[in-house]
Image (cartoon, coloured by chain):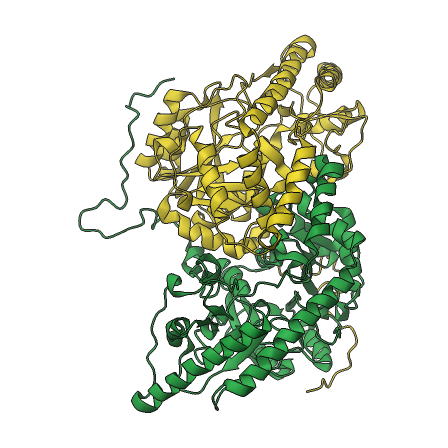
Chain colours: A yellow, B green
Amino acid sequence: MTSSQPPHLPQHRQGSEPGRQNLDPHLDRYAARTAGMTASEIRALFAVASRPEVVSLAGGMPNLTALPLDSLSTQMAEVVADEGLVALQYGSAQGVPTLREQICDVMAMEGITAHPDDVVVTVGSQMGLDMVTRLFCDPGDVIIAEGPSYVGALGSFAAYQANVVHVTMDDDGLVPDALRAALAQAKNAGQRVKCLYTIPNFHNPAGVTLSGPRRAEIVEICAEHDVLVIEDNPYGLLGFDGQTYPSLRSLDPENVVYLGSFSKTFASGLRVGWVLAPHAVREKLVLAAESATLCPPTLNQLVVSKYLSTHDWKGQIKTFRENYRERRDAMLSALEQHLPSGCTWTRPDGGFYVWVTVPEGIDTKAMLPRAVTARVAYASGTGFYADGFGSRQMRLSFCYPTPERIREGVRRLAGVLESEQELVRTFGHVSTRSVSGPQFPGPDTA
Amino acid sequence: MTSSQPPHLPQHRQGSEPGRQNLDPHLDRYAARTAGMTASEIRALFAVASRPEVVSLAGGMPNLTALPLDSLSTQMAEVVADEGLVALQYGSAQGVPTLREQICDVMAMEGITAHPDDVVVTVGSQMGLDMVTRLFCDPGDVIIAEGPSYVGALGSFAAYQANVVHVTMDDDGLVPDALRAALAQAKNAGQRVKCLYTIPNFHNPAGVTLSGPRRAEIVEICAEHDVLVIEDNPYGLLGFDGQTYPSLRSLDPENVVYLGSFSKTFASGLRVGWVLAPHAVREKLVLAAESATLCPPTLNQLVVSKYLSTHDWKGQIKTFRENYRERRDAMLSALEQHLPSGCTWTRPDGGFYVWVTVPEGIDTKAMLPRAVTARVAYASGTGFYADGFGSRQMRLSFCYPTPERIREGVRRLAGVLESEQELVRTFGHVSTRSVSGPQFPGPDTA
């Protein structure tokens, strides 16, 4: 059959009306969920070329310099030479069985007893988060999350049109009474609360850890209120004194979906994470994962599996912990030494982040361009809230730069804050200003 | 703060009512979209252990035996040794810039002129499909697709609660008048048609290719009706005579989203695919991808990039083509020789699949357990339709087994079909019987 029309480029109906300023001809076609898709302040950092003169305390990139690249290189070669026809081929959507067994060994370090059948390997724990939201959240459902919360989680929740309600934290993590209040309020408003999303250990971005007694209490509150717990735990093995905490999953296996990751304990660029789900949920989770990526990359799974079986991976985690502890110490002492009075901050026992509150009148988002001009970058607080809060907060990452660079970065930041305070004293509040992507610095490459 | 309640395992409210037979206590919690998530007949094949005595003509695994594993192994080692701190680190959500440039070179082979800025690297083209559906489809929106269509696409469409309307094909691919009729019918029914999803080259599962004149016609019909074209092209470079066809993207860059993949031209286990989107769409696509996986695995992108820059990748594709051509020939001649009269099938000029129609009265899904007993497996046709059609069809894959195994498999299949026809002659229609996962054979490993 041939066309009766000439094969020239077709005329499109959209975007061509006279006087209409629509730069995107597809604007009327997008799904409703795209309304929640906006470039996050934090993620934009990844996309922009880095300038080496800027000390970035903004990114969350793990410090990989401690990895034994030579032996990893050899192992990678062996995986392809010995198992190439498997490593380069499609695999199951649930993931490589041997790796799922090893993942159970890793989780046992935090008190979790699990069966490999209930583990689903994902493309980083971000995919796990996305899949769990896909399974459980209809548009308008409420997810309760700490305030502040992980920016990537807020992105996934927005993509599924879930509404996020933030609950406050203190130095012992999520406050149970605040959780109760939020649940009561949602109930009164006729909202359906589907999940509590929580990062109990070395919180991103808050840097605090949920205390032992609160763990049991929070798990009970959620069970009472028929709310699923999503426990996101990328940093649990990075406690600076080697301490671990009992996972929420171990306290209530049937009501907690657990998200794990090798991004912070091995290598983020492999994108290997996992979900441990109640058995009844696992089958649907595999189906969801299948429709999302067919299967996680086989090569990457075999590389992680080989690493776990041949390397002293616990020793490697200890090395990471020591590196991060040294950097945390550098940051805390520099904050103590340099930051002007009126600033407060958290004191993390593990993980990557310190959460800073600046004096009233200073807006961290508006200040960012001035900070970058002074060659230091941070993540402003509003990106970690779904509700616009956080303008007096910022996240400082100590994971990536050297201790010397961290000290220098904090010194520069203190100078910016002092100038800002001077402005506030002279002119009152400093106005909020919208900051677009390219003004953000890239991650610290020095 | 300490809990006033003992830290025992909480009591759950769901699933504990006396007399209630609810094996999944989370049943009332799932999102509405999970109703469409059912184990596909085809995907289940991946999950079940393979039996070597069964000739599987069911899977779609590429034949990787022609890959130069030794030199790939060396390259992989070099990537980690030379660029390990990049390869093992987070990257941008859009993908590695060098690889995106190389992807433009690959697409140029099919007449596409594109800018690397408009390419988004994905975790296989399945993720691209999922992201495009996420961007464009609200629940209830209609996607028009060929009937039969790719089972993984149907899975993604179901996950976003889109309704699939199938349009018929003939030996020249999608029939334009059938497309017009479907569009008119949807319009009359008040439905919003968002996309045409099409596999123009060496269709999975139908094995046919869209003719040149129809390409222009279909692109025009879609533009006229304000319908976005999703062009899925994993097999385009696997034409057995080395022929390529102009991509739909090249005919209408502003109204076609193009999905590409290295799964069939290099290695599926790396999970590296891409989307080429109109520039206006690309930014939203990156945001969607970010919330789905943060970024595609950096290691895998560098491995593909190095492969493309140092290997004779066009020569490798030629080798693949020759392997698949030999297998296609083996299958077609065996079908000709063995299949009982009343069977018809397509004659693909490329790709992986032959689509077979069996005589009336035979149900390919009901027949499958008997085929497996006779040590041959195929993919029954209903999995490739969203509407239950396909019970007289089956997909036979010639990509993976050796020519000898293919001939033996077809010989066995012919025997099963003959017995089935004998049953039909004696008892009338053979009853449909539900087939559960474990009765499916695994992919052919012989």
Number of disc labels: 0
**Front residue (pair A152, B60):** B60
Q: Is residue B264 above or below residue B101?
A: below
Q: Is residue B17 above or below residue A294?
A: above
Left or right, residue B18 beside residue B251: left
Residue occupying the far left of the picture: B19
Is residue A250 at all visible to an observer of this figure? yes
Q: Position of residue A399 (x, y in %)?
A: 64, 25
Give the position of the N terminus of chain A as an image quadrant. bottom right
Give the position of the C terminus of chain A as an image quadrant. top right
Which residue: 41% across, 59% down? B35
Which residue: 63% across, 60% down? B64
Left or right, residue A140 beside residue B284: left
Is residue A43 at all visible to an observer of this figure? no
Q: Position of residue A29 (x, y in %)?
A: 62, 61
**Front residue (pair B36, A112):** A112
Q: Position of residue A218 (x, y in %)?
A: 37, 29
Left or right, residue A339 beside residue B104: left
**Front residue (pair A114, B154):** A114
Which residue: 50% across, 32% down? A233
Name which quarter of the figure residue B92 lies in: top right
Q: Position of residue A75 (x, y in %)?
A: 64, 39
